[in-house]
């Protein structure tokens, strides 16, 4: 009898401790509950075990297991876990990025991680302002194991805690990233948590920092010292009223209440952002300090207008980094900006381009003459 069939029988023994005969439906339900394929049930519903239509005697499977667990019902889930639980032994660490500039809540995040306390943190802020990067670099600075899980509407318990997988011809329970982080004492980053549905409610107990019972195996996972959960989001878990983040969901209050603190991250100051842009210029070997200053001034004006409801779009720090990277390829300021803001509607894009020409008076918008010159250069 293979492991999966064995564990189905153990589950039946736990659910029906005084039975040896089972209806086919009960056997199939046990298999589905544990996440096993139908083929795991075939040895149990074989004709040799049938005592009447739809009923099977599993005494030949139960007797050997009883001797293994010494008839102790409490030992059944422990045996199941020992037989089938596996975890990826690889450890992942964030790398120190030379372009990173410490700012905002970075020092606070470092202190929280360094304390090794279980202290869940919820970080919200507009897209592209460095939330995830900040947590990653805090873990990198301290040399802590770092596990990032990207959340989406389909993320569920199987993705987070783990599920049954076919490995080397055997169905085993493979522990997910959350259980791995707990056992390793790692920093667990739940990225874009406001994209999740109620399928992530399985994390409620974990957000309390207490041991967790894995329902599918009966195994109890106790968090190792240093384990912590940090979540990032574009919203505060109440949805996006302005429609900017249409995929953002309303997170259950009971779930949000389990985060000890919340951080509302804004964009960096002009001086900090200039350092970030300069670092990216160094990375791409395209140093132009005047261009860097003009870019951050331009972005700052747009953001102030955005906060005053004057425009519907904003230039993020990430967008400025993209412009620098594009500039390293094309060596053309306006073309680089044009390409990197092309996702905006035409009116917004034109307004942003025009604004940049006012900030940087050394550039002009492309006209028909420039286009002709470009066309001629291709010939």
Image: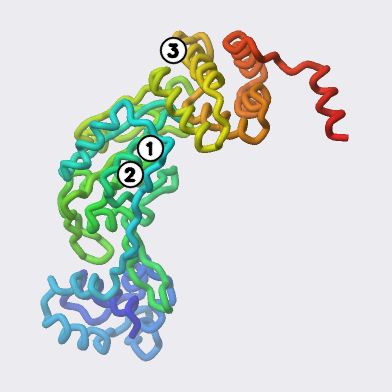
Q: Which mark, residue 307?
A: 3
- Give the image quarter of residue 83: bottom left
Q: Which mark, residue 161?
A: none
Give whichever of discs 2 and 3 has the lower sequence position.
2
Q: Residue at x 17, y 84 (%)?
A: 68
- Label 3 residue SS: helix
- Label 2 residue SS: strand
Reading the image, the residue beneath label 1 is: 132
Q: Nearer the viewer, residue 230 or 286?
A: 286
Q: Position of residue 37 (x, y in %)?
A: 42, 71
Reading the image, the residue beneath label 2 is: 189
- Give the image quarter of residue 350: top right
Residue 116, placed above or below residue 332: below
Decide: marks 3, 1 in contact (CB < 8 A)?
no
Foreground: disc 3 or disc 1: 1
Residue 239, placed above or below residue 150: above
Q: Quadrant of the N terminus?
A: bottom left
Q: Is residue 355 visible?
A: yes
Decide: marks 2, 1 in contact (CB < 8 A)?
yes
Q: Position of residue 271 (x, y in %)?
A: 40, 19
Q: Nearer the viewer, residue 75 or 10?
A: 75
Q: Residue at x 22, y 41 (%)?
A: 113
Q: Quadrant of the C terminus?
A: top right
Q: Residues within 10 Å of mark 1 (few under 14, many from 20)?
A: many
Give whichever of discs 3 and 1 has the lower sequence position.
1
Q: Residues within 10 Å of mark 2 (few under 14, many from 20)?
A: many
Residue 198, placed above or below residue 5: above
- Label 1 residue SS: helix
Q: Is residue 237 visible?
A: no
Give whichever of discs 2 and 1 has the lower sequence position.
1
Decide: marks 2, 3 in contact (CB < 8 A)?
no
**Left or right side of 74 for 285:** right
């Amino acid at each position: 009898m293979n492991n999966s069939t064995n564990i189905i029988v153990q589950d039946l023994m736990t659910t029906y401790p005084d039975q040896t005969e089972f209806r086919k439906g009960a056997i199939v339900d046990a298999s589905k509950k544990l996440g096993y394929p139908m083929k795991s049930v075939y040895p149990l519903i074989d004709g040799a075990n049938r005592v009447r239509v739809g009923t099977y005697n599993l005494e030949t499977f139960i007797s050997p297991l009883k001797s293994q667990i010494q008839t102790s019902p409490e030992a059944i889930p422990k045996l199941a876990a020992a037989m089938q639980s596996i975890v990826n032994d690889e450890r992942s660490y964030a790398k120190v990025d030379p372009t990173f500039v410490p700012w905002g809540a970075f020092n606070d995040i470092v202190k929280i991680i360094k304390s090794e306390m279980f202290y869940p943190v919820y970080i919200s802020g507009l897209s592209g302002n460095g939330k995830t990067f900040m947590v990653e670099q805090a873990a990198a600075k301290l040399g802590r194991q770092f596990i990032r899980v990207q959340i989406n509407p389909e993320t569920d318990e199987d993705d987070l805690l783990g599920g049954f997988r076919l490995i080397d011809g055997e169905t085993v329970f493979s522990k997910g990233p959350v259980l791995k982080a707990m056992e390793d004492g790692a920093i667990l980053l739940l990225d874009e948590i406001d994209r999740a549905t109620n399928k992530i409610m399985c994390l409620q107990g974990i957000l309390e920092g207490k041991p967790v019972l894995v329902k599918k195996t009966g195994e109890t996972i106790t968090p190792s010292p240093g384990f912590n959960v940090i979540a990032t989001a574009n919203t505060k878990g109440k949805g996006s009223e302005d429609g900017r983040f249409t995929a953002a969901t309303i997170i259950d209050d009971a779930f949000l209440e389990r985060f000890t603190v919340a951080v509302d991250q804004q964009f960096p100051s002009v001086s900090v952002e200039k350092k970030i842009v300069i670092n990216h210029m160094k990375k791409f070997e395209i140093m132009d300090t005047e261009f860097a200053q003009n870019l951050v001034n331009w972005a700052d004006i747009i953001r102030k207008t955005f906060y005053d409801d004057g425009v519907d779009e904003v230039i993020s720090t990430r967008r400025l980094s993209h412009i620098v990277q594009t500039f390293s390829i094309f060596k053309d300021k306006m073309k680089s900006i044009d390409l990197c803001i092309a996702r905006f509607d035409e009116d917004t894009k034109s307004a942003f381009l025009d604004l940049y020409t006012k900030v940087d008076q050394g550039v002009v918008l492309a006209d028909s003459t420039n286009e002709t010159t470009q066309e001629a250069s291709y010939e």
